[in-house]
Image (cartoon, coloured by chain):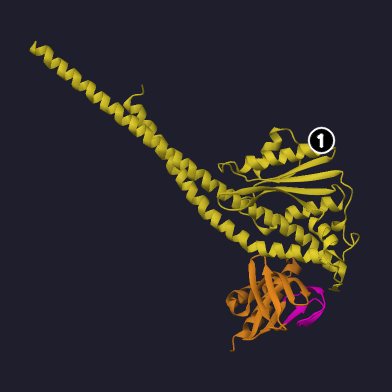
Chain colours: A orange, B yellow
């Protein structure tokens, strides 16, 4: 049980995950980073992206939508706006969201460009993450 | 002595009241379950958010962000959170009483107090007492969304940043259990956790990415939003729980009343039958004579 770190992912919709894992890889604002046990204290914002952790039973993949990560020597705490496990992602819904965002961007008369762009990115990443998991 | 028909009418009236209270109880129960679930989902997030802030606080200087500034206390904002609707027992009066006490206490100490209200009950209460309201948000209880919390938080942050106030206090009902709600008067800003943590916790030298300023710029307003949102949800769950038990009591009282009225009705009916019999017997006796 040594060399394990506690990974906790919490969102306003509840505690998504809380397990001891071997390794966590996430998409920080300055690029991807990887955490092993004994990491220096580290705080970063997270971009929309994928979070992977390695457990004894194989990797677990998450989709994370913005957030913060607080990393200590034996703990990784992810505070995300939303997050879900790859197998829980509703691909149909993401595709629909993708299309909606795309349409809005095409029309370009929308005022809220940033929002449309963000939702496009979110949907695209969701689909990507979900499909990573499927071919198993 | 009420006539038979009067009593019957009353029984009917009480019966229909009890039907209404029973239905309201059931509605409150289902709303309560929803509110409780949302609250339980948010709690871990809000707690973790607090713990992150306190562990960061060690390395945070108050100049880094306006929300970290601690000024000598002169002007105090108090935000009172109640429901929009009544019929929920002592839910609103408890909170209003606690808030008024707190306000007069602060005023006696010579602070300039500004009151804001969330929920129609608080707004009406302070209006009746001629307390000027800085701001009032009504019509949000029942369908709380994160946007509501954001709106309120933005206003709070603005006032604090503009130095319109030195301290912001929030009074709301915290959910303990279905039977118990606790009135909480808590300080939103300056951040209490940070102040306390700065003294007790060891200072970690965190690596910040992208930068300390960016992290605090993001995290601090977000924290205010989350704390407001949490208070809204706690209050919502408490309100429905309070309404549930209030309606339960009302239904019980109505049933008791129906029982005693029925007894009275039966007694009166029996009395009138006896009287009629006496009349007949009396008449027969007279004819015989």
Where residue B42 appears, as percent x and y from the top left, is 65, 62
Residue B29, above or below A23 = above
Where residue B148 appears, as percent x and y from the top left, is 69, 55
Q: Quadrant of the C terminus of chain B?
A: top left
Which residue is situated farthest in the top direction here? B289
Magenta span has A7?
no
Can residue B132 be spotted in the picture? no
Pointer 1 local density, CA inside 10 Å: few below 14, some 14–19, many at least 20: few
Task: Name the residue located 87 percent from the left edge and 43 percent from the top edge.
Answer: B74
In the displayed structure, does residue B61 sit left or right of residue B29? Answer: right
Q: Which residue is mark 1?
A: B108
Can residue B256 be spotted in the picture? yes
Magenta span has A32?
yes
Residue B17, above or below A86 = above
Predominant SS of the magenta segment: strand
Q: Secondary structure at mark 1?
A: helix
Which residue is situated farthest in the right direction here? B63
Which residue is situated farthest in the bottom direction here? A136
Where residue A83 appears, as percent x and y from the top left, is 66, 73
The stretch in magenta equals: A24-48
Count of marks overlaid on the render: 1
Q: Nearer the viewer, residue B35 or A129?
A: B35
Q: Chain of mark 1?
A: B
Q: Quadrant of residue A55?
A: bottom right
Task: Name the residue located 26 percent from the left edge and 24 percent from the top edge.
Answer: B272
């Amino acid at each position: 049980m040594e060399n394990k770190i506690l990974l906790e992912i919490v969102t306003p919709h509840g505690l998504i995950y809380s397990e001891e894992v071997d390794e966590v890889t996430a998409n920080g604002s300055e690029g991807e980073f990887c955490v092993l046990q004994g990491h220096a204290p580290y705080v970063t914002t997270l971009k929309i992206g994928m979070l992977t952790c390695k457990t004894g039973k194989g990797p677990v993949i998450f989709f994370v939508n913005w957030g913060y990560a607080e990393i200590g020597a034996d703990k990784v705490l992810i505070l995300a706006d939303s997050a879900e496990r790859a197998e829980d992602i509703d691909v149909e819904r993401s595709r629909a969201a993708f299309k909606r965002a795309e349409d809005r961007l095409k029309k370009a008369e929308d005022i809220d460009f940033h929002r449309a762009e963000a939702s496009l990115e979110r949907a695209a990443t969701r689909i990507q993450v979900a499909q990573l998991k499927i071919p198993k | 002595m009420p006539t038979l028909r009067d009593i019957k009418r009353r029984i009917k009236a009480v019966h229909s009241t009890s039907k209404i209270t029973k239905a309201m109880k059931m509605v409150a129960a289902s709303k309560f379950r929803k509110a409780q679930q949302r609250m339980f989902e948010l709690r871990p997030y809000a707690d973790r958010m607090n713990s992150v802030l306190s562990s960061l606080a060690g390395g945070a200087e108050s100049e880094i962000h306006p929300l970290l500034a601690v000024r000598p206390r002169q002007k105090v904002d108090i935000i009172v959170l109640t429901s929009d609707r009544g019929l929920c027992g002592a839910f609103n009066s408890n909170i209003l009483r606690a808030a008024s006490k707190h306000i007069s206490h602060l005023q006696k100490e010579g602070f300039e107090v500004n009151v804001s209200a969330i929920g129609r009950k608080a707004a009406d209460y302070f209006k009746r007492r001629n307390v000027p309201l800085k701001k009032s948000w009504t019509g949000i209880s029942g369908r709380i969304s994160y946007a509501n919390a954001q709106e309120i938080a933005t206003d709070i942050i603005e006032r604090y940043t503009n130095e319109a106030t030195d301290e912001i206090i929030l009074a709301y009902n915290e959910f303990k259990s279905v039977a118990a709600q606790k009135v909480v008067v808590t300080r939103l800003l300056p951040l209490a956790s940070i102040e306390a943590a700065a003294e007790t916790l060891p200072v970690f030298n965190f690596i910040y990415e992208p930068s300390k300023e960016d992290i605090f710029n993001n995290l601090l307003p977000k924290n205010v939003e989350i704390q407001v949102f949490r208070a809204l949800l706690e209050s919502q769950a408490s309100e429905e729980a309070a309404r549930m038990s209030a309606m339960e009591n009302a239904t019980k009282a109505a049933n008791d009343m129906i029982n005693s009225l029925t007894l009275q009705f039966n007694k009166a009916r029996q009395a009138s039958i006896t009287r009629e019999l006496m009349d007949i017997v009396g008449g027969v006796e007279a004819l015989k004579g």
